[in-house]
Amino acid sequence: HDYIRGFLPILYSIGWSPLKFWKKEVKNGHVERVMDEEIKSSAIEVHGINTRTTYITCPPDPEESLGIRLPFLNLLLKKTGKTGEDFTFEITVIDDKNIQRRIILTTFTKKMKPMMYSGFVPLKLSTFWDHININLTTVTNEIFGAKYVETVKIKIHPNCRIRRVYFTDRLYSQRELPSDYKKKISEESKAAP
């Protein structure tokens, strides 16, 4: 993907092959492009019974690294599934001590839980589309007491719909975002509670 003015996309649900640079692992679930009524556009749906057996990951080869040094990870996604089903995604980073660490953002934990090589971060999502922005510099420092250097891998587990995943050089306001990076909610959905 091209790096354009501080934005580096790694997944966009519209286009010829949105998962070209992602590996799909599917058992008792599905990963497919669907039409989302709320945004009146396509999204990638990752759905499964077990989060260990259904997911998408980038890069597809476990020996490769994304090597992305932009410190802000952005996801435009919607939690799906039954009420009570949890959602998780993982970011593997390298810190200034050259140690790979996993940051696990999940709806099933209520407080931050740091460990040696991984850390759990609570995530609260609505049932509508959310724009999640993660400052990897801050999170790496808070969990591991280390400095963020680069992102190695991203893994997204069920149950969600994804519109876009991208990195930025800084935090951008809604006004500064290019139009196709914003969530566009249909008029009917705006009226929903």
Image: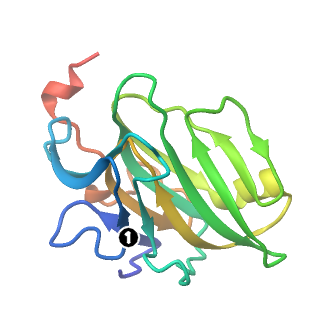
Residue ID for mark 1: 23
Q: Could you say which quadrant of the image residue 80 lies in?
A: top left
Residue 11 image offset from top left, x and y in percent: 34, 66
Most extreme residue toward the top, as rendered?
193
Q: Residue at x 46, y 50 (%)?
A: 173
Residue 115 image offset from top left, x and y in percent: 81, 51
Query: Looking at the image, is 2 positioned above or below residue 40?
Result: below
Q: Amino acid at mark 1?
A: Lys
Q: Residue at x 83, y 64 (%)?
A: 146
- Of 191 and 101, nearer the camera is 101
Observer able to see residue 83:
yes
Q: Residue at x 20, y 20 (%)?
A: 191
Q: Could you say which quadrant of the image residue 68 lies in?
A: bottom right
Q: Quadrant of the N terminus?
A: bottom left
- Of 46 and 161, nearer the camera is 46
Residue 84 image offset from top left, x and y in percent: 45, 23
Q: Residue at x 22, y 26 (%)?
A: 190
